Amino acid sequence: MSVEATSRATHDPVVEKLLAAARDTIAEVPYCWVVTAAGDGGANARAVKAFPNEDGEDFWTRWFLTSRIGRKATEIRQTGRVTLAYQHRSGNAYVALAGRAELIDEPEAVESRLRLVYDPEGTLAGKLIAVRVAADHLELHVRGVTAEPWGHGRTFLDRAPDGGWRLAD
């Protein structure tokens, strides 16, 4: 679903304002944290290069690359979910999105993203796999947009079956 279709499905000006702030934050953050569930019940977090969604793809579908045989890929295979956390360099905005994660083992999915990073020898392509995350939950705090005082409570949005977003209960 495109950003435009998602916007039409939402219809709530408060939610639209929150989504716009989240989109702006995500667009300005080159690296995000990916959090996966660990086998021991804990969580593992590591920084990854955040790649934009593909042309015509829903904005809330996000991508990153990972080693095809690493712990991160194994944990994604086991749970099928991740959380991506974006912290704006100003310190005044963060967005955490959670959703279904799929390992995409297609050369073009990896190579199209590797073109955006430094890999002059082309040595990474065979070692990496693409991860597509379809967000269904957002947590955000953006100074001047979400409730104040800063740091006291967060705003949560959930994805509705029609693709729109709504404030979570």
Image (spheres, rainbow, N blue to C red):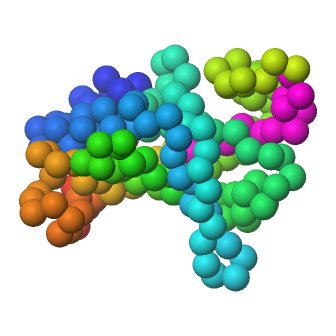
Name the residue rendered at 52%, 28% in the picture: 53
Name the image quarter holding the N terminus: top left
Name the residue rendered at 80%, 46% in the picture: 67
Q: Decide: is 38 above or below 65.
A: below
Image coords of residue 69 (percent x, y): 86, 52
Image coords of residue 160 (percent x, y): 34, 49
Name the residue rendered at 90%, 33% in the picture: 126
Name the residue rendered at 50%, 34% in the picture: 30
Give left or right: position of 109 versus 96: right
Q: Decide: is 73 above or below 88.
A: below
Assess whether residue 107 is covered by the magenta stretch: no
Q: Can residue 12 be seen in this snapshot?
A: no
Image coords of residue 155 (percent x, y): 23, 59
Q: Decide: is 137 above or below 1.
A: below
Residue sitting at the far bottom: 40
Work out whether residue 41 or residue 123 is closer to the camera in this orientation and state it. Answer: 123
- Start and end of the magenta stretch? 122-133
Give left or right: position of 149 versus 82: left
Name the image quarter holding the C terminus: bottom left
Q: Can residue 39 be seen in this snapshot?
A: yes
Work out whether residue 113 or residue 132 is closer to the camera in this orientation and state it. Answer: 113
Residue sitting at the far front: 90
Image coords of residue 128 (percent x, y): 81, 38
Total numbered badges shown on the rendered structure = 0
Give left or right: position of 5 versus 142: right
Query: Dividing the picture into quarters, in which one does residue 58 lie?
Result: top left
